[in-house]
Amino acid sequence: MNSKSINLTILAFTIPLYYLGCSMGSTVGSTENFKVRADRFADIEILRYQVPEFEKLSLRQKKFVYYLSEAALSGRDILYDQNYKHNLTIRQSIHSIVEGYKGDKNTKSWKQFIAYAKRIWFSNGIHHHYSTLKIIPEFNKSYLVELINNTNGKFPLKDGESTDEFIEWLTPILFDPEIDGKRVNLDPEVDIISTSANNYYDGISQDEVDMFYSNMKAPNDPTPIWYGLNSRLTKNNGKVVEKVWKSGGLYGDAIDQIVRCLEKAKEVAENDSQTNELEILIDYYRTGDLRTWDTYNMAWVKNTEIDIDYINGFIEVYGDPKGIKASYESVVEINDFEATARMKTLSANGQWFEDNAPIMDSHKRDKVQGITYNVVSVAMLGGDVSPSSPIGINLPNSNWIRSNFGSKSVSLGNITAAYDKARSGGFLDEFAYTDKEKERSKKHGSFAGKMHTAMHEVLGHASGKLEEGVGTPKETLKNYASTIEEGRADLFGLYYIMDPKLIEMGLVDSDEVGKAEYDGYIRNGLMLQLRRIQPGEKIEQSHMRNRAYISHWAFEQGRPDNIIEKKISDGKTYFVINDYEALQKIFGELLREIQRIKSQGDYEAAKQLVEKYGVNVEQGIHEEVLERSKALNIPPYAGFMNPHYKPVTDENEAITDIMITYPDNFLEQMLYYDEHYAFLPLENN
């Protein structure tokens, strides 16, 4: 494996490598006839997105997108290994079987294996991308033996290990739900570190994590680094130590490849500021210095006079139950100027929204600055946003950088468009109670969702401040920090989407937009999102938890006045909003409380809110949702294939153009990525 990594590194910027992409079933595809749906398996649908702005770019800009895209994909191995220590070994084994199995490929068991392989690729490992529970194969253990013994290809055997010994080792890892069964365990009654299967900690207890980072924190530091963001915590001769992800350190081979791509991108950056920020990012990858990471984020957030932007680094902490360590993530994006222009009013009035928010005055920012909002077309997704992608992003995550330098918010326009195109009206017809509600949603629902996402990202995450002397949320709110923050941003958008000020600003044409979002949010939070979890499970994912506790808390608070009414008709349950203005006030009250929880670092209040309203599932409702959803045959999850970029060269091998094609075979794209973006050894210690 190491020799393969070296060979790929050498080939990284030679043109023949990229001509191999034709095997993915690429299509150019016109906008009018473009097929969004590409594949479907298990509970997942695979979609495709277009990048119409790409053809409008200059050659220099196309090259910039190309090199940034190569950087994005070069960190793929890192995420697999972060998610679980055996993922790379398992992925290579699956790859060998898919390409080299000699047996009958028309059997039910083979189809089950292919579906399992696709699920592993989709989740970047053997744990479900959303629930984080281990994905158990539907084929039996004896078929795994058949697959391995009848495959032409190499399996990742250790020195002196036989194939039978390898099978004996692999079988319980894949089939036993009790062995590393959950990637992220948020149960406050257990040690959430030792019971989580992710690879951010090795042989470490929760108490040891708390002690290590509390001792590291500098008291009264107004500009604290995000301690532990880019490292694995382990032990060396009994002493707790960090292994930093950097060039020459942990994940160094993949990081070196990312750096090579960023060096190429730097040569064709759009302006001097972008060149400078890329130089800082490269320095960060080489040193692992978190002060350098902060310096990079300050430079990145201030650079707004560009057409092409990107995210690249260890970004989000949802995969760590402590909310400390970040997964690798990258997005390459092209500004959609027409769509962005329509939403400039939102960011331009950030101070008005802050001043009039229903939170305590002491928790409001005196000066809201540096808020930028763009609608973008994604050109490439990598790491933890691929294949499953968000529709909006707001960065950086550092509270003090956001307060002093601002933040960048983006709505992923072409991703949202693809979701909308693939979305069916079946859920609306099944779960909405009245024809008026259905018509409102059909007319305003899509736009209402986009507006709420924009307000969540642009205003919600950028609002509020901590009280003096209060630690960062990951320190004070601990395992509840992520869901409290997402709920806070959701509530900010929910409160204001019904405000007449939006009509005055020309952002919406009537309060029907807000009502459509309220209908959909309550419907999803109380019922629809439950289709994403299995019977008997609790809600684990941070965004699902925040939607649940907001909806259940609002339902309970409004019960005396019947603000949200639970109705039963023909044996089916519906939730109907009777008073939208009263519900807005309830959302405002909860926003005030959640901002207080964050600003004061009130862990017990966060725990009580989330555990009471956001975790447990009413089994009768859950069974009903699953039964009604099953009849609709609509998968609860969707993700994306990426476009493929191929350089065109002249006789001197100078790049004269970059061609974009749109692969339509998910399995083949994953096999291609396995072969051409594998830069790490199977075990990374």
Image (cartoon, rainbow, N blue to C red):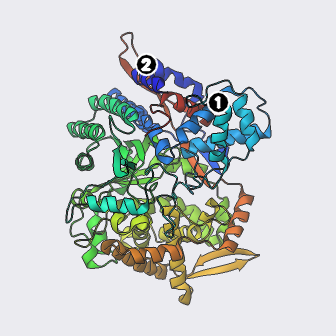
* Residue at horizontal 67 percent and vertical 80 percent from the top: 567
Visible residue check, residue 665? no
SS category of the residue bearing label 1: loop
- The residue at the far top in this view is 651
Q: Which amino acid is tagged 1?
A: Ser
Q: Quadrant of residue 266?
A: top left
- Residue under label 1: 162
- The residue at the far bottom in this view is 560
Q: Classify 657 as above or below 79.
A: above
- The residue at the far front in this view is 237
Which residue is more in the foreground, 33 or 403?
A: 403
* Residue at horizontal 43 percent and vertical 81 percent from the top: 585
Q: Which amino acid is tagged 2?
A: Ile
Visible residue check, residue 164? yes
Q: Classify 513 as above or below 327.
A: below
In the picture, the disc for residue 55 is none
Q: Locate residue 55, reporting x and y percent.
A: 42, 32
- Residue under label 2: 15
